[in-house]
């Protein structure tokens, strides 16, 4: 029991620290940074960046959402391989990262047994270094960074960026292999990295949305042990949780607010209400089996299917 408590505390501290860093970088005036940010500079210029790839078929309207120098936020795990094969799909994400973890072969499905698969954590930040199109193939080069390093990335172009930019200018090696490679590594990515679909529009995840997700994770860790909560989060579509939150915030913005009303407080209330909805659903789901109307209501609020809700109910029985 003591061991579980320690894990919960450590996990909560990690999420809390991450949330605070996101909030700090949200407020900083980058023009006021000193030029001698040596610690950050050294961190970004170390030689242990490694190349990873993720190939996927994307529609042109999705690809057109990407611009060089954009920041991307992806609030889900990303699965990559370091097998630098010729691309077999129409879009290649070429990702430079120093924060990677190889997944043991025994934890991989059979179709991936012959590949080295790596994972990047549950909150990922990228800067688009280059977008290169050759024939029907597009290569999007990304620099993976942590939120603390964003201070320097906004301040000046770093040596690692210049190096990656130069490497990404090389011609793309297209494949003559016509086989269909249908492996779906990144099942949690709704459209492309950093993007999700909302009301038939492609939108970018924002830093505010990531802060919301981190707040949600912290609250969930208050109520459940860490092993259980990762199982539960596996059942949710993160973009659906964000849509519910974003729609609530947009509704608040459209409301006519009195001059004396504290908008920040109202926004915080809406955020807390969205979080409470998820927490309450997790807590009461075990009592919903026989009440189809309540189940429909909860399913609608969370923007998840009743089948997914049933999975959560079954999980809470264990």
Image (cartoon, rainbow, N blue to C red):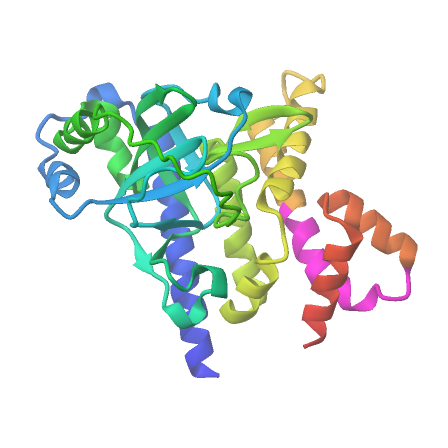
Total marks placed: 0
Q: Is residue 56 visible?
A: yes
Dividing the picture into quadrants, the one containing residue 12 is bottom left
* Figure quadrant of the C terminus: bottom right
In this picture, residue 235 sits left or right of residue 9: right
Q: Is residue 289 magenta?
A: yes
Q: Position of residue 290 (x, y in %)?
A: 90, 66
Residue furthest to the bottom in view is 1
Chief SS of the magenta region: helix
In this picture, residue 142 sits left or right of residue 64: left
Question: Is 238 drawn above or below residue 260 in the view shown?
Answer: below
Q: Nearer the viewer, residue 72 or 83?
A: 83
Q: Position of residue 186 (x, y in %)?
A: 49, 47
Q: Position of residue 265 (x, y in %)?
A: 59, 33
| Magenta-highlighted residues | 275-291
At a point 58% along the width and 57% down the height, the residue shown is 233
Q: Is residue 292 magenta?
A: no
Dividing the picture into quadrants, the one containing residue 251 is top right
Q: Position of residue 69 (x, y in %)?
A: 32, 22
At a point 84% along the width and 55% down the height, the residue shown is 295
Question: Is 90 drawn above or below residue 236 in the view shown?
Answer: above
């Amino acid at each position: 029991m003591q061991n579980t408590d320690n894990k919960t505390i450590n996990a909560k501290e990690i999420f809390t620290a991450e949330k605070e860093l996101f909030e700090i970088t949200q407020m900083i005036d980058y023009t006021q940074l000193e030029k001698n940010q040596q610690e950050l500079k050294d961190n970004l210029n170390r030689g242990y960046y490694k190349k990873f790839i993720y190939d996927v078929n994307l529609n042109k309207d999705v690809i057109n959402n990407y611009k060089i120098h954009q920041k991307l936020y992806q609030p889900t795990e990303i699965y990559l391989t370091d097998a630098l094969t010729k691309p077999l799909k129409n879009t290649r994400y070429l990702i430079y990262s120093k924060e990677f973890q190889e997944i043991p072969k025994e934890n991989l499905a059979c179709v991936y047994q012959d590949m080295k698969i790596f994972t990047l954590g549950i909150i990922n930040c990228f800067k688009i270094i280059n977008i290169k199109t050759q024939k029907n193939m597009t290569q999007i080069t990304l620099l993976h960074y942590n939120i603390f390093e964003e201070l320097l990335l906004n301040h000046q172009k770093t040596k690692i960026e210049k190096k990656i930019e130069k490497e990404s200018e090389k011609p793309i090696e297209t494949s003559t292999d016509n086989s269909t490679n249908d492996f779906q590594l990144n099942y949690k990515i709704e459209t492309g990295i950093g993007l999700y679909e909302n009301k038939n529009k492609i939108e970018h995840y924002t830093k505010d949305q990531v802060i919301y997700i981190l707040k949600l994770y912290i609250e969930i860790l208050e109520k459940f042990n860490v092993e259980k909560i990762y199982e539960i989060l596996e059942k949710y579509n993160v973009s659906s949780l964000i849509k519910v939150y974003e729609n609530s915030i947009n509704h608040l913005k459209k409301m006519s607010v009195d001059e004396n009303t504290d908008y920040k407080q109202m926004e915080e209330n809406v955020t807390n209400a969205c979080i409470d909805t998820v927490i309450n659903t997790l807590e009461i789901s075990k009592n919903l089996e026989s009440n189809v109307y309540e189940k429909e209501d909860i399913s609608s609020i969370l923007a998840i299917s009743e089948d997914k809700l049933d999975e959560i109910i079954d999980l809470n029985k264990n």
